[in-house]
Image (cartoon, helix red, strand yellow):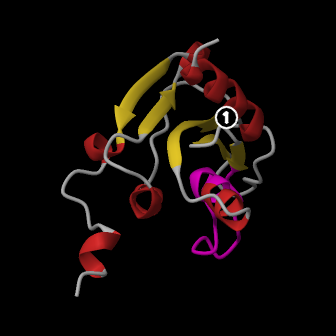
Amino acid sequence: MTEASKLASLAIEAMSRAYAPYSGYKVGAALLCADGAVYQGCNIENGSYGATNCAERTAFFKAVYDGHREFTAIAVCGGKDGVISDVFPPCGICRQVMREFCADDFRVYLVGKDGVCTERTLSQILPDSFRPQTHMQK
């Protein structure tokens, strides 16, 4: 089983745990740490919408809480009522969270219908991004 297919399978599993009573769009993610650990995340909606948390950030925040800071790949899937009909790319906020922890070559697997993955790098989905290193320079 390839890295992409393993992560895709775990992202699809995570999608089933989503709490999406308002939009009906369920999203799942599976984040691969540099040491091989995998963290799953799902979207968790809230009636105030701004308090909603995406699947990707759920996975990152769980991993960071457990002490992980180095990541190599993430798979993301989503769809209305939990049915994948097309790729479901990360939102801008999630892309910026990825930038906080990940290098340009961080792999993003967009899981489409029938589990087929389209691979992108972080630099492809977030070109010319604000980088933490820029902010922290003296």
Quarter of the image holding residue 12?
top right
Which residue lies at the image location 47% right of the left edge and 58% below the top edge?
94
Residue drawn at 22 percent across, 51 percent down: 127
Mark 1 neighbour class, 10 Å CA radius: few under 14, some 14 to 19, many 20 or more: many
On screen, residue 14 versus residue 120, left or right, reads right
Q: Which residue: 36% across, 32% down?
A: 120
- Residue 25 image offset from top left, x and y in percent: 64, 45
Residue 6 higher or lower than 67, as above or below: above
**5 in relation to 111, above or below:** above
Q: Which residues are magenta?
A: 42-59
Residue under pointer 1: 11
Q: Position of residue 34 (x, y in %)?
A: 56, 43
Choose top left, top right, bottom left or bottom right for residue 131: bottom left
User: Which percent across, then down, holds residue 111?
Assistant: 53, 27
On screen, residue 119 versus residue 53, left or right, reads: left
Name the outermost residue toward the right. Answer: 17
